[in-house]
Image (cartoon, rainbow, N blue to C red):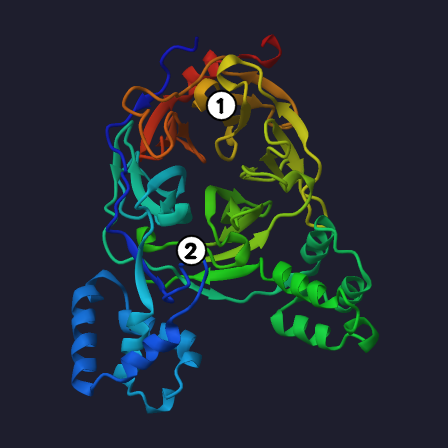
Amino acid sequence: MTGILATRQSRTLAPDPRRVVVKLFVPGEDAAVAHTRAHDLVDRIASLDPDQTRLLLRRTLRDFGDRHRDLEGTFRHHYELVRHRVERSRQLSPTARLLVGAYFSHEYAVEAAALCNPSMVAHPDQSGLRPGQLRVAVSLRQIGEGHLSSIGFASAVLGPGSRLAVGRRSGPLVSGRRSHVHHRRDLLAAGLREEGWDNEVCATVLAALPERYDEAGLERTLAALPPDLLYRHTTTDTLEQLRRLSAASYAVAFPADTLLHERVLWPATAAESSGMEDARFVRFVDDAGTPTYQATYTAYDGRRIAARRLASDDLTRFRIDPMRGPGARNKGMALFPRTVDGRHLALCRSDGETIGLTVLADDGTWQAPVPLHGPRRGWELIQVGNCGSPVETASGWLVLTHGVGPMRRYAIGALLLDLHRPERVLAELPGPLLAPDDTEREGYVPNVVYSCGGLLHDGLLWLPYGASDARVGFATVPLDALVEAMVDHRSG
């Protein structure tokens, strides 16, 4: 037994159904067999007299306007998305167009079902603090209707000592505006290889594309394909695949005056249409000393999972790219906070049950992992994985782990890796560091504690964790006591 090392804080975060975003709603598309009723609805709206139109729009803006930023702008955008359904679009007044947008909108409570799986990094704004304090950004997995996950945030201040102050999470949410980016040809090539698309069309396109290209450049390259290739029976599917793989890279930007807790990273591509899960954030410092925020998350389309990588200078604008290669073929990758001996490293679990170490190759792919730690003790015999990016300490890389035991009970443990040779496991905690207690067993997913990453501050390991997906808790662990409680990894 490891004794009691972790101290739970009394402050927690619970799911708040008042946190809503406005999404496009098309009547009939939510049925088991989609049969849109949009055309008839638009006709009915267009038939309203002007006074009714103004009254309905005014009431809608009165009832919902203070819950959202620029609701009229959202209605206008949703009208543009469905205007092809409007036969008399030129005859509609600006007010009627806004009302059409209102009828094609609905609120979605991003965390109505669950709030869980947090990670914690130093906040980009450290102003106005007292000695011994650190402001942190907490990422959150938010789950709403239909088990659809998005990424949200909270702010908190740690210290002095074990004090914790969590910021309010009030105010309208913003899901950001998606923008295009320049894509990487090497990631496109790796994606085609992984999914078995090796034909003359793919080879011709890759040979014609520059190392970096945008959507317009891709379309010009596709349009220039020789006719003999265009008329092959597989070409239509191949072109769709090329566009889909390229679309995996995109950017999202939020208004500069939004607060961190108001920002929501919402699924933006087909590959993540059923959720963005378990973001593991880390503050990465490159060899020149320049910091960026990076994260990995799992994209889910309802059938398949895929690894994605986020990057941001200030948590206001984010770039998303796919992660390719044998080291990125499952959930739960976690990036190291710096290079080690010039190598970009990540923890992974490519076989579904073993923690491994993978290296980023020159072609942008994550290589076959070196196994570090597999299921071996009773509390983790089903599978093990990481609970976020390694934390650098004087004793080694501290890796928080999760293990799954009887009755699918999740608990959190710890490993220690060599600072210079992370392939070498120095020590492990022989038992759980944190397991569900009697107050944490019940929830959306019972008997689970799970984290996506903590940090060190003033000699304490700060560990945010999800408790049965019912709420997010916080615990502290004295680093020296944790390292002292570890045993030689070979002794298990």
Q: Residue at x 54, y 13 (%)?
A: 377
Image coordinates of residue 23 in percent, x first then y, are 36, 62
Image spot of residue 146 (x, y percent): 39, 48
The image shows a total of numbered marks equal to: 2
Within 10 Å of disc 1 (Cα), the crowding (few <14, some 14-19, many 20+) is: many
The percent position of residue 466, horizontal first and vertical second, equals 37, 33
Residue 395 appears in view:
no
Q: Residues within 10 Å of mark 2 (few under 14, many from 20)?
A: many
Q: Give the camera-side residue of 97 and 202.
A: 97
Residue 65, above or below 111: below
Classify residue 187 by image quadrant. bottom right
| Viewer-closest of 72 and 312 | 72
Query: As displayed, is residue 382 above or below residue 102?
Result: above
What is the three-letter code of the residue carrying label 1? Val
Q: Is residue 186 visible?
A: yes
In three-dimensional space, the C-alpha distance between marks 1 and 2, rounded to whole angstroms, equals 29 Å
**Residue 226, image x, y percentages:** 81, 76
Q: Is residue 233 left or right of residue 328?
A: right
Element type at mark 1 = strand
State the residue at coordinates (21%, 76%).
57
What's the mark number on residue 427? none
The residue depicted at 33 percent of the width and 24 percent of the height is 441
Query: Could you tell whether 301 is left or right of 2 in the image?
Result: right
Label 2, secondary structure: give it.
loop
Which residue corresponds to mark 2?
Answer: 266
Point out the image quarter for the N terminus: top left
Q: Nearer the viewer, residue 458 or 316?
A: 316
- For residue 404, which numbered disc appears in the image? 1
Query: In the picture, which quadrant includes the C terminus?
Result: top right
Q: Is residue 62 left or right of residue 206?
A: left
- Point out the tag, 1 or 2, that comes first from the N-terminus: 2
